[in-house]
Amino acid sequence: MKLLEKASRIYLLASLLIYAAVGIAFFWIIKFMIYDEVESRLMVEKQDFETYIRSNDTWSNNSYFVENKIEVVPVFGKFDNKVAFTDTLISNRYDETADPFRQLTFYTLIGGSPYRVAIRKSMIESYKLIEAISAAMIAFLGLLLVSTFLFHRVLSGKLWKPFYDSLARIKDFDWTKNKPLETVRSEITEFNELGDVMEKMASKMQHDYRSLREFTENASHEIQTPLALINARVEQFIQSKDLGENHTYWIEEIYHAARRMSRLNQGLLLLAKIENQQFTEQEELDLSELALKKLKDFEDILQHKEISVTVESSGSFRKIMSPALADILLTNLINNAIRHNYNGGELRLQSGTDYVQVSNTGNPLKSEPERLFERFKKESTGAESLGLGLAIVKQICDNCELRISYQYEEPIHSIRITG
Amino acid sequence: MKILVVEDEKGLAESITDYLSREGFICEVANTFWQADEKISLYQYDCTIVDLTLPDGNGFDIIQTLKKIAAATGIIIISARNTLEDKLKGLEIGSDDYMTKPFHLSELNARVKSLIRRRNFGGNNDMTWKDIRVNLPARKVFIKDIEATLSKKEYDLLLYFLSNIDVALTKESIAEHLWGDNMDSADSLDMVYSHIKNLRRKIVEKGGKDYIQSIYGIGYKFTAS
């Protein structure tokens, strides 16, 4: 959820609660005041009534109290002499509606015998007043709510604009390029401070990236050069005519070790480069077609190992990624499928609009499949395998937002790349 | 044929010049950028082998100068950097080939020879050794003037041998020459063996001598003796 939306929602919710509480409180206060007013008037009438009874000692429904209904009922037996206010509904004399009344009940002696007296006052006007006040209040509060809400929204949008502009620039920032990050300056100190920090971090990132990149290149150079020297010297050495069987064995071992080390170094450097995202060139590629082309490069070895190849394609898998990485990815996958295949085995290349799958016959895995993509995880103890091929594949997938999965259904191993 | 080797690693420069001298080339070495700069402005070379990373300069600059003053010179880059950008840049500014360290001397030798052949004859020539004649543009092989039908790989293998006569070639260098860098399994060495067997059979069938000599534990040598 966006910051502004979240803030608006919280603001709206809080305002609604507060306004509702204020509204209810207001309603009760008005109601209390009206009741207080009516009751004091009823008390005054009670006094009037009692004064009248005291002087006349009799009661008849005369026109003295036009406005109010006074009901005088004789009481027999025991009664609880107390004064009470109650709400009551009395049916209208002229139509069939029931109108609300406030009623004061008390007991008094008229001509020596006890009577219960009820004085009523119509509340109809008061209720109308409450309704009118409430309606006006709801309208005003609503208007206030909407206008402050809109004001708040517009204000926040304006205040946060430099932040969002800077955010957009940070999103566009690419630390593999030389262009420095420039955030948007504004009147707000916090945003400027944030911008300063981000710019500092960005330039540090660019600097670190450059030095790491230089380091990988230098390391490659520094290690490959002495290896090249070993290789060259061994090649010169084997030209001598009088080499014994022992000598050739040792030389071969040295030569092998040097080549292995060189390949290992290249593999690790490649992994580091992928991790550092040094392959920045992007192109839209058809991975299914590319895989098929790669497979042709391996024709000789496929023939040699008598591996039968089946290709199934149900559409082209298009993906925007570095062509160099795509090449390495597919080469390693096919290489893996051939290396762990047996003579006379099978290799399947399947592809669709969102996947490429390479399957091969092979012996069951000795280790857990989850560890298949780890570095230096070797299935065969053969010195030829470096244990980096699938680690490189995994790293490329991670970097290019591709998913990789492994499946085994005896005797077929499948590795599937999904977009 | 004069070759200039621009390489700061003295041992490697020495190995390259020793190896190429045995093949009949006249080699000179420049260990620094300035030495190289001086040599190319003073002398003419048929081929220049340039390392990209020099302590006092960049190999690319040498190539650019070289292209200005002697466009006919063949240029082979040898570099420890194997990025695509470097390879493309090298080709863009006029180099003919790019080799990544570590490389096989036999491979470098084959590439130098092929480059000089292309430069001098436009690739339009025959290559003859003893009773083997190769028509390069048509990719045809004749043994005692009888055509031998070789597969593509067998042809490449023969050419590699013919570029490295009397030289002990490792199985690895042959495998890499035929299938490139990305097929480094034990299988490729088996394949080398079977291709050698076929080539040997085809040459002998047409009445040629068995020139391929196995060297125990190491590889093969193409030799008349």
Image: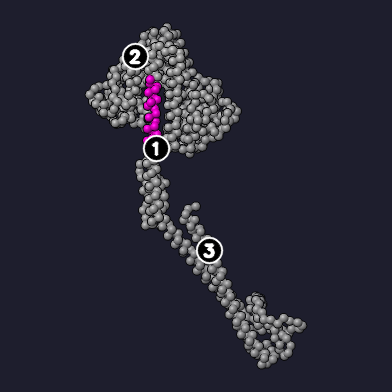
| The residue positioned farthest toward the right in the image shown | A77
Residue identified by numbered label 2: B126
Discs 2 and 3 carry the same chain letter: no
User: Label 3 belongs to which residue?
Assistant: A16
The magenta stretch spans residue B116? no
Residue nearer the viewer, B66 or A306: B66
Q: Which residue is mark 1?
A: A212
Q: Position of residue A363 (x, y in %)?
A: 57, 26
Point out the stretch of residues depicted in magenta: A214-233
- Asked whether A221 falls inside the magenta stretch, the response is yes
- Corner quadrant of residue B95: top left
Pick the front one: A100 or B219: B219
Q: Which amino acid, mark 3? A: Leu
From what the image shows, is residue A190 above or below residue A96?
A: above
Identify the secondary structure beneath mark 3: helix
Report the mark closest to the observer, 3 or 1: 1
Q: Residues within 10 Å of mark 1 (few under 14, many from 20)?
A: some
- Tell me the residue at 38%/44% (across/down): A204
- In the rendered image, residue A35, in percent from the top left (x then y), is placed at 60, 77
Residue at 38% of width from left, 13% of height from top?
A: A240
Q: Is residue B139 visible?
A: no
In the image, residue A158 sits, relative to residue A216, either above or below, namely: below
Q: Is residue A212 left or right of residue B61?
A: right
Q: Is residue A238 left or right of residue A116?
A: left
